[in-house]
Amino acid sequence: MQGNKPSKKKISFPLQGRLKGYLKTYNSFAKLPLHYSDLQRYIANTPLLNSDGTDTLWETVYYSDFEFKEYNKSLCQIYALIKTDGNLEAIEHLEVARIDFCTFGNTNPFRIRIINKLNDNYDHFYIKRVDTSRIYGLELERLLSPNYVGYLVDKETLVEEHIAGIPGDDFLSKYISDNEFDNTRIAKEFIKFNERCFVRLLGDMRSYNYIVDITPDIEGSQYRIRAIDFDQQSYEGWKSFYLPQYFKGNNPVIQMGMKHISPTAVTQYQLEERSLIALRAKSSKTRLNSLLKCMINDSISFPNKVEQLRNELSYHHKNNKFLTCKNMGEIVLTNIQLVIQKEFKQSIIDISD
């Protein structure tokens, strides 16, 4: 299997005026009572360990009593903004149970645990630094996938709701069974996920950058794979970086597909997913066009990466239109146009080195 080596540290690009206008038009811009920089004023931190005693690379952070009291109120208000459109009646019995800080990744998020005092039920959301790539990734997820992710932006702060599910690496190491029916369904979903990422050019889908959502059904279970990391939206130059099949951590599910799904069925599932993407693109035409205009006029990568990706996609699709693309926005637009025109070339799924 091919390996992929992304840039050591992805460069974050600032939010520009055209994209700000788009976010305001579609109600993703909000005035927040607290910002990312406020949460950086913690006075102590301790490593957060999982149930096995392993360091999670998150830290639980602590604030002065006065600040935590103020933050508790503001964070509950933010939770209401993202969950109930700001209806404060819904947060009467909520409070902040814990704040964790992620020591790795591009956006160094704070994870807020909100707990219901009446029944101890809890939920999470995240406060991160704004990264334009991530915002485009979140929007394309809304418009071209079956998933919705709630988020809000204010100045340098990005608020995201939690996406519930089993982390892909945990799922592949702990939850795979010998049930042929389940394995076939998992492999089928991965084929569709692989196609969604490749069409909209969402990169770096290693097994820890997506979750598996399991829904019990009449017979067996249904599986959905959902991206949870959108930082690598149309940033790197390798075509294979946008195909989850090429990350070694995903080998177990690739092997499942090779065992249980014929090449003909693989092609069928890819065509089905591209048809769904085309339908979503057509049904959200006005909003998608507006987003892609922002993307085309924005800077979210570097010329050498743009040149490499357009050359590789031109070769893959046997289509010279990519060679005229000047930026990542135009490359994404061309990819989507090929899907709508039914000229998108499938990827061959294998695990060869």
Image (cartoon, rainbow, N blue to C red):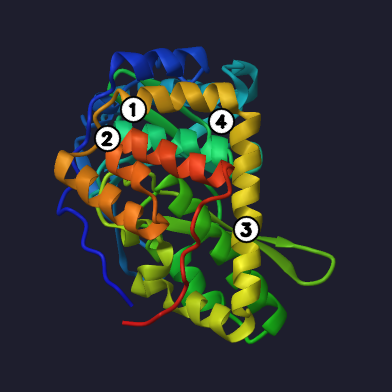
Q: Distance between the residues labelled 3 and 4?
A: 45 Å
Residues tagged 2 and 1 counted as in contact (Cβ below 8 A): yes
Q: Name the residue under label 2.
A: 327
Residues tagged 2 and 3 counted as in contact (Cβ below 8 A): no
The residue mark sitting in front, 3 or 4, is 3
Q: Name the residue under label 4.
A: 94
Local packing at callout 3 (Cα closer than 10 Å; few below 14, some 14-19, many 20+) is some
Q: Tag 4, which secondary structure?
A: strand
Local packing at callout 4 (Cα closer than 10 Å; few below 14, some 14-19, many 20+) is many
The residue mark sitting in front, 1 or 4, is 1
Residues tagged 1 and 3 counted as in contact (Cβ below 8 A): no
Q: Tag 1, which secondary structure?
A: helix
Q: Is residue 41 left or right of residue 201?
A: left
Q: What residue type is labelled 3?
A: Leu
Q: Name the residue under label 3.
A: 271
Residues tagged 1 and 4 counted as in contact (Cβ below 8 A): no
Q: Is residue 226 left or right of residue 271?
A: left
